Image (spheres, rainbow, N blue to C red):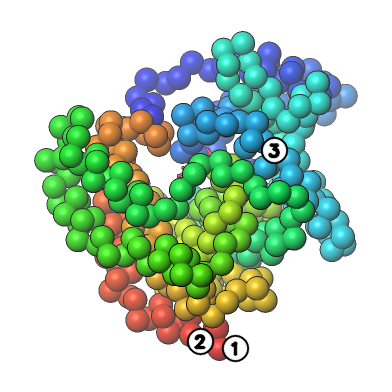
Amino acid sequence: MSLAVPPVLPDLATVIRAFALHGRYESGEPYGSGHINDTFVITLDQAGRPVRYILQRINPRVFKNVPALMDNIARVTAHAGRRTEQMGARDLSRRTLTLVPTREGQPHHVDAAGGSWRCYLFIEGARTYDVIEGPRQAAAGARAFGEFQQLLVDLPGPRLHETIPFFHDTRRRFDALQRAIAADVRQRASVARADIAFALEREPMVDVLLGLHRRGELPERITHNDTKLNNVMIDDATGEGLCVIDLDTVMPGLALYDFGDMVRSATNAAAEDETALNRVQARLPIFEALVEGYLGAARSFLTNVEIAHLAFAGRLITFEIGIRFLADYLDGDVYFKTRRPEHNLDRARNQFALVRNMEAQQDAMEKIVMKHAGS
Ligand code: ADP
Ligand code: GN1
Ligand code: MG
């Protein structure tokens, strides 16, 4: 979705009034660097004290069934909150997302234009990092995502809704890229010739995890599916992974998708859209910290087959997101928010440079996994 023309700010004062909150509206402004939803921070004056909230407009092009999505989030946050409390944790409202219901007691509000909004308590004293600064942060984030998977092992009730069907089905993502190349609706394929060739050469990768799953060798679990490290809040005071956020894609999936996306987003020495590709590199000390942090929380339930594919999953998910960016560039930027005409192409090139770098470091990564899996 192109943002070349700055979007008009919605009437945030009116929207926030739909939620069961008191206080006088002070301010509201865009917040964060997510690619999908519109996120705002709202400040209310509550008895002379400024209190912040997160207000989000859910992207209707990406999420077709908002009630199902919100049902997942309500169940997951309630369960995570209960479990965290049982574990004796303090500071509960900073450890799991807390939905603020609407005045009618609903989990989301539909505005006059049909837009769907939700509101969360703002988690203060913590932040997210687009580029991870060092191994400690990486380990903290990976541990938080591992604990999150562990927390959901016994989620009661029916199977969660698939908010985006086939989200990590890399074969379907690859087929979608091939369709985008064939259609070439914006005549962009010639600009991306080398990038397209890079992607097509790597087709054999796309079926590996799907095949293992089909043969019963990789179990379905409840996973987050969008474990970009900026989807975990890191506590300013302690440096610990405080709270896993961005729960739109929590649904049945493979644990390896979650670990793979941590590797993609955290090991990169450069930002996801950095165009100086010599700066793109998978940092091994960060990779090692991810393995340690994630296994520290998830070893108790992971199978040997899962552990044996941790390094591969990093490469695969980096490739998968790369082909999604490339397909979106060819399709005319209809899915991810973009801030410049070639933004998606820049992101795809960045991810492919990271894949290439991971290929060169494959043996070292496998050794790191073996070192920690054995202990
Ligand atoms: P998107 O799906 O667009 O990535 P996110 O849910 O990840 O949206 O939110 C975007 C950003 O807003 C996050 O990276 C984080 O910095 C911030 N954020 C989201 N929820 C909260 C919260 N409850 N408290 C504080 N900051 C938050
Ligand atoms: C999107 O919502 P956000 O910005 O955390 C995307 C992920 C991609 C990521 C790439 C629902 O994540 O799948 O990995 O961008 N989310 C969705 O940065 O498509
Ligand atoms: Mg996010």
Query: Residue 321: percent from the left, percent from the top?
Result: 38, 51
Residue depicted at x 46% and y 70%: 215
- Residue lying furthest top: 112
Spatial separation of the CA atoms under disc 1 and disc 2: 7 Å
**Mark 1 CB near ligand 2 (8 Å cut):** no
Residue depicted at x 37% and y 67%: 208
Indicate which disc, 2 or 3, sits on the residue closer to the N terminus: 3
Q: Which residue is mark 2?
A: 371
Is residue 215 among what the camera can see?
A: yes
Q: Which residue is mark 3?
A: 71
Do the numbered discs 1 and 2 sit on residues whose CB atoms are within 8 Å?
Answer: yes
Q: Which residue is mark 1?
A: 375
Q: Secondary structure at mark 3?
A: helix
Query: Residue 264: percent from the left, percent from the top?
Result: 42, 60
Do the numbered discs 1 and 3 sit on residues whose CB atoms are within 8 Å?
Answer: no
The label nearer to you, 1 versus 3, is: 3
Query: Residue 106: percent from the left, percent from the top?
Result: 76, 27
Q: Secondary structure at mark 2?
A: helix
In the rendered image of this protein, does residue 66 appear above or below residue 354? above
The image quadrant of residue 117 is top right
Residue depicted at x 80% and y 21%: 104
Amino acid type of the residue that numbered disc 1 sits on in the rendered structure: Ser
